Amino acid sequence: MQDVCVFCGASPGENPIFMQSAKALGEAISHASMGLVYGGAKVGLMGQVANAVLAGGQKVVGVIPQSFAHKVSHEGLTQLHVVDSMHTRKAMMFELAGACIALPGGFGTLEELTEVLTWAQLGFHQKPIGLLNINGYYDALLSFFDQAVLAGFLKPKHLELLIVHHDPTQLLQLLKDYKPQTVVKWAN
């Protein structure tokens, strides 16, 4: 696992702990001598995590759609890919990284996280997927996943595809230690 793809908000959030945690994740990635792949913006949690990795001397690759690249692109990245669509963006970010982590964010972050989880559930990849649950931000989502198991829409073993922690350094270590398992969506 050389590079980590981070999904996160382009907003800073209302609680300063979100920006602090984005910076801490970027510092942990840099300290682990890993690179960052992310959405390419200079704003919000996205800009914070990128700046922390850059400050630590590691590479940062951004992938941003052309439709808003002129508004929010981070100009100090190691490499910036301007692509034609959000679909192309997600696919490229995923391909360039060996693991994915979601920080707090909105619809886009949730969609990116659940898409890579779905791909893992279907057996399309075995990359580790992490969730940095800052200040309980994702507690309701994790409860929803538990409810989906109880309702019969997810199998308990599918929940094991998501590695959850509140500490960036610990989460990175868990991702590094991850041993892929064979998960078959259609098996009983």
Image: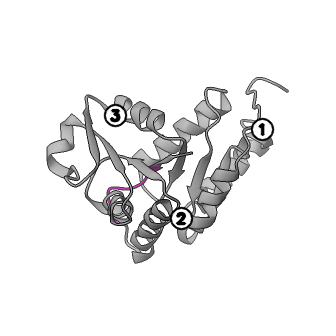
- x and y percentages locating residue 80 in the rendered image: 26, 42
Q: Residues within 10 Å of mark 1 (few under 14, many from 20)?
A: some
On residue 137, which mark appears?
2
> Image height check: is 42 above or below 185?
below
> Image height check: is 77 above or below 66?
below
Question: Who comes first in sequence, dot 3 or dot 2?
Answer: 3
Which quadrant holds residue 127?
A: top right
Q: Residues within 10 Å of mark 2 (few under 14, many from 20)?
A: some
Q: Residues within 10 Å of mark 3 (few under 14, many from 20)?
A: some
On residue 155, which mark appears?
1
Query: Mark 2 belongs to which amino acid?
Result: Tyr
* In the image: residue 82, left or right of residue 95: left
In the image, what residue occupies the spot 47% across and 41% down?
112
Mark nearer the viewer, 3 or 2: 3
Which quadrant holds residue 158?
A: top right
Q: Is residue 48 magenta?
A: no
Tell me how far mark 3 sits from mark 2, CA to CA.
24 Å
Query: Mark 3 belongs to which amino acid?
Result: Met
* In the image: residue 54, left or right of residue 171: left
